[in-house]
Image (cartoon, helix red, strand yellow):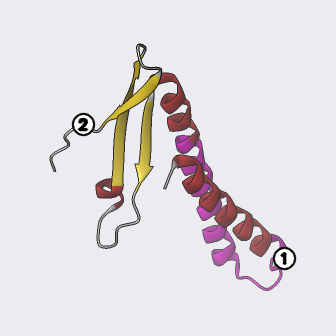
């Protein structure tokens, strides 16, 4: 899963939470409204972080992906691939660094 795909998931979650908050303001307890608002702000922070890494990705020529493997933490699912240009053959070579856990 690429950063763009991950960001879309969070954008959809944020949109749904905002709609829930707007449409159910009278029916939702105040404490729950605060929790929803906090979740929206947390999603916004995550999306800002993803935007930052998207910019780094394009500037520094690396590819950050998230696998969908079950039973792994979010940090274990992250794959970083470094890209280097092969000027002679007009192609991009992707090297996966060895990351030991």
| Relative vertical location of residue 49 with respect to residue 101 in this rendering, above or below | above
Residue at 55% across / 55% down in the picture?
A: 6
| Mark 2 surroundings within 10 Å by alpha-carbon count, few (fewer than 14), some (14 through 19), many (20 or more) | few
| Mark 1 surroundings within 10 Å by alpha-carbon count, few (fewer than 14), some (14 through 19), many (20 or more) | few
Which residue is label 2 attached to?
97
| Magenta region, residue range | 22-50
Coordinates of residue 28 in the picture (x, y in percent): 74, 82
Residue 41 belongs to magenta span: yes
Secondary structure under the numbered disc 1 in the rendered image:
helix
Coordinates of residue 22 in the picture (x, y in percent): 83, 70
Residue at 79% across / 86% down in the picture?
A: 27
Coordinates of residue 45 in the picture (x, y in percent): 57, 48
Relative side of 96 to 15, left or right: left
Coordinates of residue 31 in the picture (x, y in percent): 64, 76
Secondary structure under the numbered disc 2 in the rendered image:
loop
Residue 48 belongs to magenta span: yes
| Relative vertical location of residue 81 with respect to residue 32 in this rendering, above or below | above
**Front-most of residues 14 and 31:** 14
On residue 23, which mark appears?
Answer: 1
On residue 33, which mark appears?
Answer: none
| Relative vertical location of residue 14 with respect to residue 81 in this rendering, above or below | below
Relative side of 4 to 71, left or right: right
**Majority secondary structure in the magenta region:** helix
């Amino acid at each position: 899963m690429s950063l763009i795909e991950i960001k879309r998931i969070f954008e959809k979650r944020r949109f749904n939470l905002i709609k829930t908050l707007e449409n159910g303001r009278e029916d939702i307890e105040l404490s729950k409204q605060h929790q929803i608002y906090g979740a929206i702000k947390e999603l916004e922070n995550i999306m800002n972080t993803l935007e930052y890494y998207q910019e780094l990705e394009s500037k520094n020529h690396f590819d950050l992906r998230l696998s969908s493997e079950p039973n792994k933490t979010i940090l274990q699912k992250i794959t970083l691939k470094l890209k280097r240009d092969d000027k002679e053959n007009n192609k991009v070579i992707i090297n996966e660094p060895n990351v030991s856990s």
